[in-house]
Image (spheres, rainbow, N blue to C red):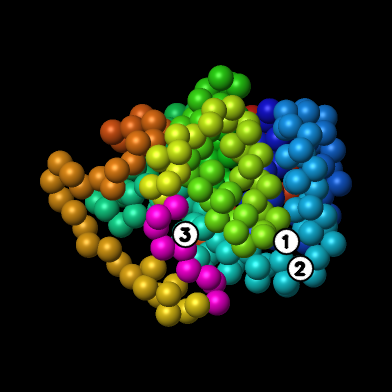
Amino acid sequence: MRRTFKVLSGLLSYPTAELQAAVPQLAAAIDREALLPAAIRRQLERLLNEIATGDLYDLQERYVLLFDRTRSLSLHLFEHVHGESRDRGQAMIDLKALYEGGGLEIYAPELPDFLPLFLEFLSTRPRTEAYGLLRQTSHILAALAERLRKRRSAYEAAFRALVALAAAKPKPDDVSALLVEPDPDAADLVALDAAWEDEPVTFGPYAGNGCKDGLIAKIRAGRRPAPGVADAVRPSMPRP
């Protein structure tokens, strides 16, 4: 479990030469733990191969277009459940405290809700706790997988793998509520600007944006380099 979470954290991080070189070890780590269904493991092979053999600059450009430029594909979990609401800042603080309570320290410029960082934290937790926390984000992961499927992106496999690990089918209504949000193409600069336009902040008891996510209820209801080869294939221990 630890290795699989760390591998998926690495695959969803900004591509580097180190990540490319680590692909054989990442694939071997997934196979050793054997937590993923065979069909998803085969689907994940495409992403592993693309990262291993692709031109690094092309991989980096693709990553930025997908996950940095396109708000609907943001790897920051709270973007999809809090948006610009006032609750987001406090949720960040509380999630950071959750990490620190588990022995994981965060260094700038990492934000607590960055998905690869969340997965790294899960890799340090007991199995039941890790799966429980992951399960409570499954509707976000499923929505991202669907958006990537429509783009025929190999990154879809990483999100299908996470949904499979969560071992709980997200509620269709929760996924649909996320999928109705604008999902512009990364090449449509006008639509992207509109999607990133600041949203009004709502105050009062209805300030939330309808998040039904148990993780967020529990904790308050950029870009991160890929991990090195050793970190990707060796279980990490919480910092003392």
Disc 1 packing (10 Å; few <14; some 14–19; many ≥20): some
Is residue 140 at all visible to an observer of this figure? yes
Distance of mark 1 from mark 3, alpha carbons?
24 Å
Mark 1 or mark 2: name the one nearer the start of the chain. 1
**Residue 31 found in image quarter:** top right
Q: Left or right? Give the position of 24 relative to 13.
A: right
Coordinates of residue 41 in the picture (x, y in percent): 77, 39
Coordinates of residue 57 in the picture (x, y in percent): 73, 72
Mark 3 or mark 2: name the one nearer the start of the chain. 2
* Residue wearing tag 2: 56
Q: Amino acid at mark 3?
A: Ser
- Identify the residue at horizontal 79%, vertical 59% (top origin): 50
Q: Mark 2 and mark 1 in contact (Cβ < 8 Å)?
A: yes
* Residue wearing tag 3: 72
Q: Left or right? Give the position of 83 relative to 6.
A: left
Disc 3 packing (10 Å; few <14; some 14–19; many ≥20): many
**Residue 225 found in image quarter:** bottom right
Q: Secondary structure at mark 3?
A: helix
- Identify the residue at horizontal 65%, vertical 68% (top origin): 62
* Residue wearing tag 1: 16
Q: Amino acid at mark 2?
A: Leu
Distance of mark 3 from mark 2, alpha carbons?
24 Å
Distance of mark 1 from mark 2, alpha carbons?
7 Å
Write down the region rendered in magenta. Answer: 179-187
User: Which is more foreground, mark 1 or mark 2?
Assistant: 2
Mark 1 or mark 3: name the one nearer the start of the chain. 1
Coordinates of residue 234 in the picture (x, y in percent): 75, 34
Prevailing SS of the magenta stretch: loop
Coordinates of residue 155 in the picture (x, y in percent): 66, 54
- Identify the residue at horizontal 45%, vertical 29% (top origin): 101
